[in-house]
Image (spheres, helix red, strand yellow):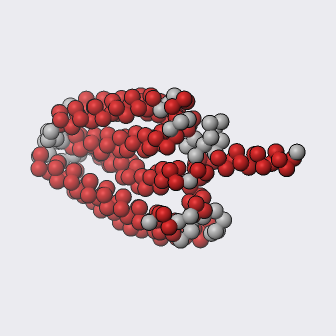
Amino acid sequence: MLKKLSEQDFAVLRGPLESGRQSPNSLASVLVLGIFLQALFFYLTYNIAGKYTIYPNFESIKTIHMWLTGIIILLSLLFAIPVVFNKMEKLQYFLSIIMTQNFSVFLFLAPLFLLGEQDAATVESLLNLTWITLSIAGVLFIATWIRFYLLLKKGHYRAGSRNEEMRGKFETKSYIPIAVIGSTALVFLIQFVMKTGSSDLFETIMLVFLPFGIFYTLIFVLPEQLVILYCKIRFKSFNFDINGYLNTERAAKNTRKVKQS
Protein backbone atom coordinates (compact mmCIF):
# COMPACT_ATOMS: atom_id res chain seq x y z
CA MET A 1 0.00 0.00 0.00
CA LEU A 2 2.67 2.50 1.03
CA LYS A 3 4.74 1.90 -2.11
CA LYS A 4 2.19 3.88 -4.12
CA LEU A 5 2.93 6.98 -2.03
CA SER A 6 5.80 9.34 -2.82
CA GLU A 7 8.38 10.78 -0.44
CA GLN A 8 6.43 14.05 -0.24
CA ASP A 9 3.41 12.21 1.15
CA PHE A 10 5.41 11.44 4.32
CA ALA A 11 7.02 14.89 4.70
CA VAL A 12 5.28 15.84 7.97
CA LEU A 13 6.62 12.67 9.62
CA ARG A 14 10.10 14.15 9.41
CA GLY A 15 9.11 16.59 12.16
CA PRO A 16 10.43 14.51 15.11
CA LEU A 17 13.64 13.92 13.15
CA GLU A 18 14.12 17.57 12.21
CA SER A 19 13.57 18.67 15.81
CA GLY A 20 16.20 16.20 17.00
CA ARG A 21 13.81 14.33 19.32
CA GLN A 22 14.36 11.12 17.35
CA SER A 23 17.93 11.65 16.22
CA PRO A 24 20.37 8.77 16.84
CA ASN A 25 21.96 10.66 19.74
CA SER A 26 18.59 11.30 21.37
CA LEU A 27 17.51 7.70 20.89
CA ALA A 28 20.79 6.55 22.45
CA SER A 29 19.92 8.52 25.60
CA VAL A 30 16.42 7.04 25.58
CA LEU A 31 17.83 3.52 25.28
CA VAL A 32 20.16 4.07 28.24
CA LEU A 33 17.29 5.39 30.35
CA GLY A 34 15.17 2.48 29.16
CA ILE A 35 17.70 0.00 30.54
CA PHE A 36 17.03 1.12 34.12
CA LEU A 37 13.29 1.61 33.61
CA GLN A 38 12.83 -1.87 32.14
CA ALA A 39 14.61 -3.41 35.13
CA LEU A 40 12.36 -1.39 37.46
CA PHE A 41 9.19 -2.31 35.57
CA PHE A 42 10.17 -5.98 35.59
CA TYR A 43 10.60 -5.91 39.37
CA LEU A 44 7.31 -4.07 39.94
CA THR A 45 5.39 -6.33 37.56
CA TYR A 46 6.59 -9.73 38.74
CA ASN A 47 7.74 -9.15 42.34
CA ILE A 48 5.11 -6.66 43.49
CA ALA A 49 2.02 -6.93 41.25
CA GLY A 50 2.41 -10.67 40.72
CA LYS A 51 3.52 -11.71 44.19
CA TYR A 52 0.25 -13.43 45.18
CA THR A 53 -1.50 -13.67 41.82
CA ILE A 54 -3.33 -16.78 40.61
CA TYR A 55 -2.73 -15.82 36.98
CA PRO A 56 -2.03 -19.04 35.03
CA ASN A 57 1.53 -19.94 33.97
CA PHE A 58 2.92 -17.00 35.92
CA GLU A 59 6.40 -18.49 36.38
CA SER A 60 6.71 -19.45 32.71
CA ILE A 61 5.67 -15.96 31.61
CA LYS A 62 8.15 -14.45 34.06
CA THR A 63 11.03 -16.60 32.79
CA ILE A 64 10.35 -15.92 29.11
CA HIS A 65 9.85 -12.21 29.68
CA MET A 66 13.02 -12.03 31.78
CA TRP A 67 15.11 -13.43 28.92
CA LEU A 68 13.47 -11.19 26.32
CA THR A 69 13.92 -8.11 28.50
CA GLY A 70 17.54 -9.08 29.15
CA ILE A 71 18.20 -9.29 25.40
CA ILE A 72 16.56 -5.90 24.82
CA ILE A 73 18.66 -4.37 27.61
CA LEU A 74 21.90 -5.75 26.16
CA LEU A 75 21.00 -4.52 22.67
CA SER A 76 20.03 -1.13 24.12
CA LEU A 77 23.45 -0.86 25.71
CA LEU A 78 25.09 -1.81 22.39
CA PHE A 79 23.06 0.66 20.30
CA ALA A 80 23.79 3.50 22.71
CA ILE A 81 27.41 3.43 21.51
CA PRO A 82 28.04 6.07 18.77
CA VAL A 83 30.24 3.79 16.66
CA VAL A 84 27.39 1.28 16.49
CA PHE A 85 24.32 3.48 16.00
CA ASN A 86 26.03 5.69 13.40
CA LYS A 87 26.44 2.61 11.20
CA MET A 88 23.10 0.97 12.02
CA GLU A 89 20.67 3.84 12.50
CA LYS A 90 17.65 1.93 11.19
CA LEU A 91 18.23 -0.96 13.58
CA GLN A 92 18.57 1.50 16.46
CA TYR A 93 15.18 3.01 15.62
CA PHE A 94 13.66 -0.47 15.33
CA LEU A 95 15.09 -1.35 18.75
CA SER A 96 13.54 1.80 20.23
CA ILE A 97 10.15 0.58 18.98
CA ILE A 98 10.73 -2.87 20.51
CA MET A 99 11.73 -1.28 23.82
CA THR A 100 8.61 0.91 23.83
CA GLN A 101 6.37 -2.07 23.18
CA ASN A 102 8.13 -4.01 25.93
CA PHE A 103 6.90 -1.33 28.33
CA SER A 104 3.41 -1.92 26.96
CA VAL A 105 3.77 -5.61 27.88
CA PHE A 106 4.62 -4.66 31.47
CA LEU A 107 1.66 -2.27 31.59
CA PHE A 108 -0.60 -5.00 30.20
CA LEU A 109 0.49 -7.78 32.55
CA ALA A 110 0.78 -5.82 35.82
CA PRO A 111 -2.96 -5.01 36.18
CA LEU A 112 -3.86 -8.57 35.18
CA PHE A 113 -1.60 -9.92 37.92
CA LEU A 114 -3.11 -7.48 40.43
CA LEU A 115 -6.63 -8.52 39.49
CA GLY A 116 -5.49 -12.11 39.99
CA GLU A 117 -4.99 -11.34 43.68
CA GLN A 118 -8.67 -10.52 44.25
CA ASP A 119 -10.70 -13.05 46.23
CA ALA A 120 -13.35 -13.40 43.52
CA ALA A 121 -10.83 -13.81 40.69
CA THR A 122 -10.62 -17.15 38.88
CA VAL A 123 -8.22 -18.53 36.30
CA GLU A 124 -11.01 -18.71 33.74
CA SER A 125 -12.10 -15.09 34.28
CA LEU A 126 -8.49 -13.86 34.04
CA LEU A 127 -7.95 -15.73 30.77
CA ASN A 128 -11.21 -14.35 29.38
CA LEU A 129 -10.15 -10.81 30.30
CA THR A 130 -6.74 -11.40 28.71
CA TRP A 131 -8.22 -12.52 25.39
CA ILE A 132 -10.78 -9.72 25.37
CA THR A 133 -8.23 -6.97 26.08
CA LEU A 134 -5.77 -8.42 23.55
CA SER A 135 -8.51 -8.65 20.91
CA ILE A 136 -9.42 -5.01 21.54
CA ALA A 137 -5.73 -4.09 21.21
CA GLY A 138 -5.61 -5.91 17.87
CA VAL A 139 -8.72 -4.11 16.61
CA LEU A 140 -7.30 -0.79 17.84
CA PHE A 141 -4.04 -1.38 15.96
CA ILE A 142 -5.87 -2.26 12.72
CA ALA A 143 -8.25 0.71 13.04
CA THR A 144 -5.37 3.08 13.76
CA TRP A 145 -3.38 1.70 10.84
CA ILE A 146 -6.34 2.20 8.46
CA ARG A 147 -6.91 5.73 9.81
CA PHE A 148 -3.22 6.57 9.39
CA TYR A 149 -3.14 5.20 5.83
CA LEU A 150 -6.22 7.23 4.88
CA LEU A 151 -4.59 10.38 6.24
CA LEU A 152 -1.46 9.65 4.20
CA LYS A 153 -3.45 8.88 1.08
CA LYS A 154 -5.48 12.10 1.37
CA GLY A 155 -2.28 14.13 1.63
CA HIS A 156 -2.57 15.19 5.26
CA TYR A 157 1.12 14.44 5.84
CA ARG A 158 2.24 16.21 2.67
CA ALA A 159 4.05 19.44 3.58
CA GLY A 160 1.99 22.53 2.72
CA SER A 161 -0.80 20.63 0.95
CA ARG A 162 -3.49 21.27 3.57
CA ASN A 163 -4.11 24.05 6.02
CA GLU A 164 -4.08 23.12 9.69
CA GLU A 165 -7.80 23.77 10.18
CA MET A 166 -8.89 21.29 7.50
CA ARG A 167 -6.41 18.71 8.75
CA GLY A 168 -7.69 19.10 12.30
CA LYS A 169 -11.32 18.62 11.22
CA PHE A 170 -10.53 15.41 9.33
CA GLU A 171 -8.42 13.98 12.13
CA THR A 172 -11.13 14.75 14.70
CA LYS A 173 -13.69 12.77 12.70
CA SER A 174 -11.24 9.91 12.19
CA TYR A 175 -10.86 9.54 15.97
CA ILE A 176 -14.50 8.43 16.35
CA PRO A 177 -13.85 4.69 15.66
CA ILE A 178 -10.85 4.82 18.02
CA ALA A 179 -13.03 6.33 20.75
CA VAL A 180 -15.62 3.57 20.27
CA ILE A 181 -12.95 0.88 20.64
CA GLY A 182 -11.53 2.56 23.74
CA SER A 183 -14.98 2.85 25.30
CA THR A 184 -15.60 -0.84 24.66
CA ALA A 185 -12.38 -1.75 26.46
CA LEU A 186 -13.35 0.49 29.39
CA VAL A 187 -16.76 -1.19 29.72
CA PHE A 188 -15.22 -4.67 29.83
CA LEU A 189 -12.68 -3.57 32.45
CA ILE A 190 -15.32 -1.96 34.66
CA GLN A 191 -17.47 -5.10 34.50
CA PHE A 192 -14.55 -7.33 35.43
CA VAL A 193 -13.40 -5.13 38.32
CA MET A 194 -16.95 -5.04 39.70
CA LYS A 195 -17.17 -8.84 39.55
CA THR A 196 -13.88 -9.30 41.40
CA GLY A 197 -15.16 -7.11 44.22
CA SER A 198 -12.45 -4.42 44.27
CA SER A 199 -13.70 -1.67 46.60
CA ASP A 200 -10.83 0.85 46.56
CA LEU A 201 -11.72 3.19 43.67
CA PHE A 202 -8.47 5.20 43.72
CA GLU A 203 -6.32 2.06 43.81
CA THR A 204 -8.33 0.54 40.97
CA ILE A 205 -7.93 3.64 38.80
CA MET A 206 -4.19 3.99 39.46
CA LEU A 207 -3.19 0.32 39.28
CA VAL A 208 -5.64 -1.11 36.75
CA PHE A 209 -7.26 1.50 34.50
CA LEU A 210 -4.21 3.79 34.16
CA PRO A 211 -1.78 1.02 33.08
CA PHE A 212 -4.32 -0.35 30.61
CA GLY A 213 -4.90 3.18 29.30
CA ILE A 214 -1.17 3.68 28.70
CA PHE A 215 -0.97 0.21 27.11
CA TYR A 216 -3.63 1.12 24.55
CA THR A 217 -1.96 4.49 23.97
CA LEU A 218 1.30 2.73 23.06
CA ILE A 219 -0.63 0.47 20.67
CA PHE A 220 -2.21 3.60 19.17
CA VAL A 221 1.16 5.22 18.34
CA LEU A 222 2.70 1.99 17.00
CA PRO A 223 1.50 2.42 13.37
CA GLU A 224 3.16 5.84 13.13
CA GLN A 225 6.40 4.43 14.56
CA LEU A 226 6.34 1.63 11.99
CA VAL A 227 5.67 4.05 9.12
CA ILE A 228 8.62 6.23 10.17
CA LEU A 229 10.77 3.08 10.24
CA TYR A 230 9.50 2.28 6.73
CA CYS A 231 10.46 5.80 5.62
CA LYS A 232 13.95 5.41 7.10
CA ILE A 233 14.38 2.21 5.09
CA ARG A 234 12.94 3.62 1.87
CA PHE A 235 14.05 7.28 1.86
CA LYS A 236 17.53 8.65 2.46
CA SER A 237 16.10 11.97 3.69
CA PHE A 238 14.77 10.28 6.85
CA ASN A 239 18.27 9.31 7.94
CA PHE A 240 21.14 11.20 9.54
CA ASP A 241 24.72 11.45 8.35
CA ILE A 242 27.72 10.67 10.54
CA ASN A 243 27.84 14.29 11.77
CA GLY A 244 24.29 14.16 13.12
CA TYR A 245 22.56 16.09 10.32
CA LEU A 246 19.55 14.89 8.36
CA ASN A 247 20.74 14.21 4.82
CA THR A 248 18.55 17.00 3.42
CA GLU A 249 19.86 19.42 6.06
CA ARG A 250 23.46 18.75 5.05
CA ALA A 251 22.56 19.24 1.38
CA ALA A 252 20.86 22.56 2.18
CA LYS A 253 23.90 23.77 4.16
CA ASN A 254 26.22 22.90 1.29
CA THR A 255 23.95 24.72 -1.16
CA ARG A 256 23.98 27.87 0.97
CA LYS A 257 27.79 27.74 1.19
CA VAL A 258 28.08 27.48 -2.60
CA LYS A 259 25.77 30.49 -3.08
CA GLN A 260 27.69 32.57 -0.54
CA SER A 261 31.01 31.82 -2.20
Residue 206 image offset from top left, x and y in percent: 34, 43
Figure disc tally: 0
Residue 149 image offset from top left, x and y in percent: 46, 65
Q: Look at 11% across and 46% down and name the residue there.
A: 122
Q: Look at 65% across and 36% down and name the residue there.
A: 243
Q: Quadrant of residue 6?
A: bottom right
* The C terminus, quarter of image: top right
Q: Look at 36% across and 29% down and name the residue there.
A: 39
Most foreground residue, 107 or 227: 227
Say left or right for 82 vs 49: right
User: Can see residue 197?
Assistant: yes
* The N terminus, quarter of image: bottom left
User: Can see residue 38?
Assistant: no
Most foreground residue, 183 or 45: 45
Most foreground residue, 155 or 175: 155
Say left or right for 234 vs 179: right
